[in-house]
Image (cartoon, helix red, strand yellow):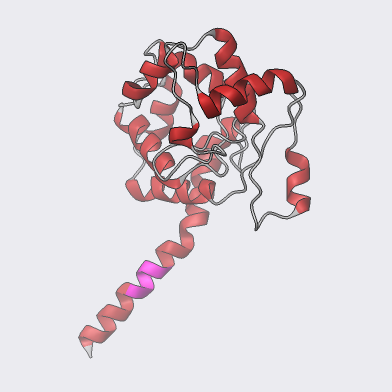
Amino acid sequence: MKKTLLTLGLLATAWSVNAADPELAKAIIKEKCHLCHGMEGESSNAIYPRLAGQNHNYLVKQLKNFRDGKRKSDTMNEMTKGLLDEEIEALAKYFSAKPALSHRVRDKGFSAVGEYLYKKGNKYSGIPSCKSCHGELGQGSDDLPRLAGQHKRYVADQLHAFGERIRTNDNTIMHTIANKLTELEIEALALYVSGIKVEEPEESEAAKEPEQRQL
């Protein structure tokens, strides 16, 4: 009987912790994240990444890398200092469940240059296609970032950081690609991925409207 009660108690505790995950995430976001990334992960400025809809495992890895100093950023290293693994898990679960949005792109011609590079690469300079890792629609994978709908400025900044080895994690493969990209190619790629829109079955039409921004 005691064993049964103990088991039920542990299950109840586990359930209550899981049930509290969204509230735990919201409390951390309100304290540490919302000024830059917004309460819903949409970010207040294009220099900060959109976290809404970002892949769960990728978010966990990046937050741990910031916390442990593997990825350098004075702001993020400070913001993640002391975060427990379960708090990071709660944040990743919260943001990854949010609908991923996109930008409306005005310059279709320039975006088409980015689309070509994204899907076919540049055989003349040895640049592989981006879709080979990040997918046809830029959704990434469990461990690779979603690029679809990300802010153009942030994507361009990260490509520069990879090329110049300023980005201190995930650099090995990305450096070999980014350091071959011209400024035009970086801007075209960043513009193209910012406008990739993936239709999510669970996303209502009403939820899609506010997300369109013109670039």
Task: Tell me residue 140's x, y (percent).
Answer: 48, 39
Q: Residue at x 50, y 22 (%)?
A: 121
Q: Residue at x 48, y 52 (%)?
A: 24
Task: Tell me residue 194's x, y (percent).
Answer: 63, 29
Q: Is residue 151 visible?
A: no
Specify the quadrant that holds the N terminus: bottom left
* Magenta-span inclusion, residue 161: no
Residue interval drawn in magenta: 11-15
Residue 163 falls in image quadrant: top left
Residue 183 falls in image quadrant: top right
Q: Is residue 187 left or right of residue 19?
A: right
Q: Residue at x 75, y 20 (%)?
A: 107
- Furthest residue to the front? 123
Q: Is residue 199 left or right of residue 90?
A: right
Task: Tell me residue 79's x, y (percent).
Answer: 43, 31
Task: Tell me residue 169's x, y (percent).
Answer: 34, 25
> What secondary structure is the magenta-colored segment mainly?
helix
**72 relative to 209, above or below:** above
